[in-house]
């Protein structure tokens, strides 16, 4: 069997690679070891940039209607127990229906746990007849040569193996990646932050027995500090409880886990355990993102603490970065250095997100060294005053985890060999805030257009050259140069003051992933040189 791209692993990241390739009209084969059913949803927060990708793919409605109760409150709250305990502090948020889009984006974040999100992505992938999605199929070996990759895959229902020849192989096979192991790529960082245990359980009466007002996420504090969290994973009757744990690994029985849930709730209520998952919280980035024709995307390339919800969202950004480069190389207009830019652009972003997630965890666990005062567990005015002081401190520490627009949208490919900077200084990076800019490497800014579209709706399949303002120069030399190299490029002329002002230059060249490749007030003298640079030649 032959296919341009074989994707190993059908978690959210593998599905996004297959989906983006399919959307570009490029065939691929995705193999996934499981049957595709998600029994222990890990991620549930789909951040703004990922929703912008969903907008591009035309599946925003699919995600919004995928199953989460969007009317459920999204507050985060720190408590001693849900019933008979105390609320220490709260960060309120509107529910998913009422939450507004940030001014920098046409989209807002969504709650879609993996048991809803992955099937929605799989339905998107199935729209493309040229894309094959094979479940219960695993990779057992692969080799690569100058022209391609030969993979041996096994059908887990029949036991039969098959040889597949592809031009590229993408390892989206998660934390224990076989593809990474086979390439001999190590990981650097901290292999154990905590040994944590998740319990997904069903309870119809939990929210009626609690006396703490409803929230999405509850963080439990006892006299030893933060010890557990609870989230509403469908906004109805399914919850995920996490015993945060520490550096000691200890297997826990269902009885112990049920007792821990009851302790957090503080009052008797019906609890039906659906699944449990011991897991190791890590802070790791792969030493390399692949070599030659094989690349790592998603958790195979980095593993981080979920504090911040950056894991899958970072992986989705990688999917979109690599997919257009794969398309360019398969179709022949991508230069020999184009795929090498994937690691150069993405590894620093992963390293930054992995470190920020670990800092968020450290802030949450600071309570273990700065122990809560005994008064916060006692009734009366002294207790109230202690709870207020402690809660305010905790709320300030935790705010870093909730306000992350800089992380979500502000990643910029500074130093990328396929972006051409000018002599101006881009805005500094700030994890919490995001200033839109059209500097080379940045996500091209969002502006609402007069016809109701976002500027983001202009980008995606090929390069787009924005010609902005009445007096924008004729870009013909640049367009001709792109045609000479078979680089797909379309020109969009806009004379809308808000766009002209924010984009700053008269000509802005935007890549297929929506990042700025180059900008200027006139085409450069060496137009072929520019085209060759941005196509990685
Ligand atoms: C408690 C928790 C909460 C989280 N919350 C969030 C959140 O809110 N937002 C967020 O962005 N991230 C979150 N994350 C992180 C997120 O879940 C991961 O980053 C994400 O699942 C990674 O996706 P992936 O597709 O790279 O890997 P995975 O989801 O691990 O998928 C890898 C797939 O590869 C398959 N596979 C493995 N080996 C083979 C093989 N040899 N052959 C074929 N198939 C194979 C596996 O079966 C699996 O389906 C959370 C993580 C945890 C633990």
Image (cartoon, rainbow, N blue to C red):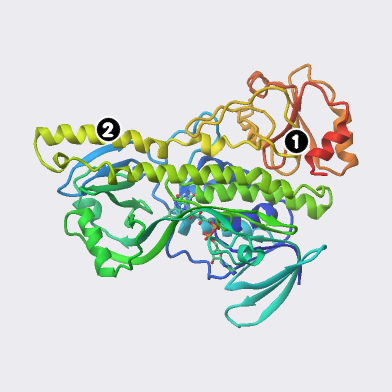
Q: Is residue 507 above or below residue 341?
A: above
> Residue 401: x and y, percent?
41, 40
Q: Judge from the rendering whether residue 537 lies leftward or rightward of residue 56; answer left or right.
A: right
> Residue 358: x and y, percent?
44, 46
Q: Earlier in the sequence, mark 1 or mark 2?
A: 2
Q: Residues within 10 Å of mark 1 (few under 14, many from 20)?
A: many
Q: Is residue 14 above or below residue 376?
A: below
Q: Judge from the rendering whether residue 497 lies leftward or rightward of residue 284; answer left or right.
A: right
Front residue of this view, candidates 119 and 533: 533
> At numbered mark 2, what does the secondary structure look like: helix, strand or loop?
helix
Q: Which mark is residue 464?
A: 1
Residue 179 visible within the image: yes
Q: Which mark is residue 392?
A: 2
State which quarter of the image contains the N terminus.
bottom right
Mark closer to the observer (1, 2): 2
Front residue of this view, candidates 292 and 14: 292
> At numbered mark 1, what does the secondary structure look like: helix, strand or loop?
strand
Front residue of this view, candidates 451 and 167: 167
Among the 4 quarters of the image, the one containing residue 124: bottom right
Identity of the residue drawn at 67% across and 73% down: 141
């Amino acid at each position: 069997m032959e296919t341009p791209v074989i994707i190993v692993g059908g978690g959210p990241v593998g599905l996004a690679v297959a989906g983006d390739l399919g959307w570009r009209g490029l065939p691929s084969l995705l193999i996934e070891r499981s049957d595709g059913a998600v029994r222990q949803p890990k991620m549930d927060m789909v951040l703004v940039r990922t929703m912008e990708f969903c907008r591009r793919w035309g599946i925003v409605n699919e995600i919004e209607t995928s199953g989460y109760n969007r009317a459920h409150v999204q507050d985060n709250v720190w408590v001693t127990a849900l019933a008979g305990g105390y609320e220490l502090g709260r960060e309120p948020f509107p529910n998913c229906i009422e939450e507004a889009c940030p001014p920098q984006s046409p989209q807002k974040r969504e709650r879609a746990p993996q048991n809803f999100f992955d099937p929605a992505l799989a339905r998107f992938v199935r729209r493309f007849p040229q894309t094959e999605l094979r479940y219960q199929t695993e990779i057992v070996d692969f080799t690569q040569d100058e022209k391609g990759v030969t993979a041996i895959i096994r059908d887990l229902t029949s036991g039969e193996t098959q040889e597949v020849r592809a031009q590229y192989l993408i390892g989206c096979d998660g934390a224990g990646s076989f593809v990474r192991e086979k390439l001999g790529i190590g990981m650097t960082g901290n292999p154990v932050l905590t040994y944590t245990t998740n319990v997904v359980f069903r309870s119809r009466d939990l929210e009626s027995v609690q006396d703490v007002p409803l929230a999405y996420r509850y963080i439990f504090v006892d006299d030893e500090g933060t010890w557990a969290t609870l989230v509403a994973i469908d906004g109805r009757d399914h919850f995920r409880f996490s015993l945060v744990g520490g550096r000691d690994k200890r297997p826990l029985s269902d009885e112990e886990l049920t007792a821990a849930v009851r302790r957090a709730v503080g009052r008797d209520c019906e609890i039906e355990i659906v699944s449990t998952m011991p897991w190791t919280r890590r802070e790791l980035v792969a030493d390399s993102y692949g070599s030659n024709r094989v690349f790592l995307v998603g958790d195979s390339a980095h593993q981080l603490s979920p504090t911040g919800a950056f894991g899958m969202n970072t992986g989705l950004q990688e999917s979109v970065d690599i997919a257009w480069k794969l398309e360019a190389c398969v179709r022949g207009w991508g230069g020999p250095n184009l795929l090498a830019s994937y690691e150069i652009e993405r590894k620093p972003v992963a390293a930054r997100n992995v470190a920020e997630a670990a800092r968020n965890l450290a802030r949450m666990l600071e309570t273990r060294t700065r122990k809560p005062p005994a008064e916060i567990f006692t009734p009366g005015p002294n207790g109230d005053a202690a709870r207020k002081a402690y809660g305010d401190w905790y709320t300030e520490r935790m705010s870093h985890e909730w306000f992350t627009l800089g992380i979500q949208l502000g990643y910029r490919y500074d130093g990328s060999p396929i972006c051409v900077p000018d002599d101006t200084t881009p805005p500094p990076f700030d994890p919490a805030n995001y200033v839109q800019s059209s500097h080379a490497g940045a996500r091209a800014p969002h502006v609402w257009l007069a016809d109701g579209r976002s500027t983001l709706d202009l980008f995606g399949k090929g390069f787009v050259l924005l010609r902005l303002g009445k007096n924008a120069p004729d870009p013909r030399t640049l367009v001709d140069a792109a045609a000479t190299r078979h680089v797909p490029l379309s020109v969009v002329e806009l004379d809308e003051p808000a766009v002209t002002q924010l984009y700053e230059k008269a000509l802005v060249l935007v890549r297929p992933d929506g990042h700025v490749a180059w900008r200027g007030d006139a085409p450069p003298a060496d137009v072929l040189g520019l085209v060759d640079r941005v196509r990685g030649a």
